[in-house]
Amino acid sequence: MGTETRMATHVLIVGGGYVGMYTALRLHKKMRRELKSGELQITVVDPQSYMTYQPFLPEAAAGNIEARHVVVPLRRVLPRATILNGRVTKIEHAKRQAWVQVVGSTSAEGDGSEQVAETRMLSYDLLVFCPGSISRTLPIPGLAQCGIGFKTVGEAIYLRNQVLAQLDIAASTELEEVRRRALTFVFVGGGYAGVEALAELEDMARDACAYYPNVDASDMKWVLVEAGDRILPEVGPDMGRWTIEALRRRGIAIKLQTLLKSAEGHHVVLSDGEEFDAGTLVWTAGVKPNPVVRRTDLPIDDKGRLKATAELTVEGVEGAFTAGDVAAVPDLTKPGNLTAPNAQHAVRQAKVLGDNVLAALRGKALKPYKHAYAGSVASLGLHKGVAQIYGVKLRGLLAWWLHRTYHLSRVPTVNRKARVTADWTLAFFFKREVVSLGSITRPREEFELAAKD
């Protein structure tokens, strides 16, 4: 008698961020036998080969944490999954098919230029769609040429090098206009990303001034531009006001109800009429769902997010799951509302999604996602923070400690927890490094100069 060949169940995970990685990791742990026997196949598609724990990007930018320690290599933690570094360009879920462009860099400068190496069509049985979000930009003159976002580890490393390089320029030039421009740093957006990035980098730059005899902390101009009437809305109005006062005491200018009108040639023009040159412009004014959502046959809402159920399935569609920034998940603790697209919900949704995908594969009932918002924590530099936990308002050292403790507990893998803890421990005994390695973005520059002589 012949033996019947069983077809493997193929799970396609679009997005290697926290949600996608955790789902694959959950399947790795709970379905080892099926993965080993070939009954289950997992494919993770993402342009990067690692997951970035974004809440730690401000500390990575400030040098409190080694940048490599805030990312988790997918191939290491998911040895039985297929990792495809590319971008999904189209999904026809009705046919269970996805098209992936596998890309490769063509530039030795590492400037991100790419060419499409090939396009692959993947067939799958179950879809986990969680490509996350991208920066929401506006058609502001000069923004695309002069600005940078703050969503990736590459941007965090760049900003660290950029800030320190601007101090180098200011310390070396005799031209006052060049010095003033180099020491001016503008951040647009008063949410978590903008406030934490500005506060951590200003704290680092203030420490670095000790090594520049002709640069004083008071010479620097740090500006936060926010279109709304408050910052850090997640921590509540009272703590938001306290944060503004704390930042202003550090000499940081907070401009509320103000818009960036232009940034051409690094000349910043604000809606309140103020104009000045700035060597650094960081855009953190919100995010939007990854545009690949619109290249699928899955249902989306008016904000471009996938319509989701409380069980984190795609509404009205079989065999499709979603969570994170790209999903409009109903908030069962506040009927009629949707969960906010923030790290707290993404981390908790990832666990439920992983369990529900596992349950679906085993034919068991799915569980709804239900989480009452516990509060928020934010770091404002070394030993400085603000928090509101279950209605309790905290600030200063205790809030900073809670920020670190909470996010350390959420960093995936024991390996990364240990490395981050080691970074913090060493920081108690040694000062952080304040050297710019901006030349790593131009590795061939010296060789080209040598070749010309």
Image: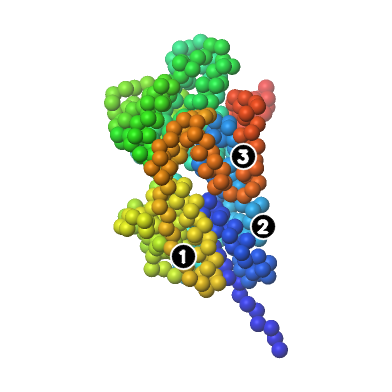
Residue at 56% over, 54% down: 21
Of marks 3 and 2, which one's residue comes earlier in the chain? 2
Callout 2 amino acid: Pro
Q: Is residue 90 visible?
A: no
Residue 139's spot in the image, x, y percent? 35, 38
Is 181 situated above or below 81? above
Residue 365's spot in the image, x, y percent? 48, 71
Please state, as top left, top right, bottom left or bottom right, where the C terminus lies in the image. top right
Mark identifier at residue 79: 2
Number of other residues with Cα within 10 Å of mark 3, as a class: few under 14, some 14 to 19, many 20 or more: many
Callout 3 amino acid: Val
Residue 316's spot in the image, x, y percent? 38, 68
Number of other residues with Cα within 10 Å of mark 1, as a class: few under 14, some 14 to 19, many 20 or more: some
Residue at 68% over, 25% down: 450
Residue at 39% over, 57% down: 329
Of marks 1 and 2, which one's residue comes earlier in the chain? 2
Residue on which disc 3 sits = 420
Callout 1 amino acid: Lys
- In depth, the one of 157 and 201 nearer the eye is 201
Residue on which disc 1 sits = 367
- In depth, the one of 333 and 37 nearer the eye is 333
Number of other residues with Cα within 10 Å of mark 2, as a class: few under 14, some 14 to 19, many 20 or more: few
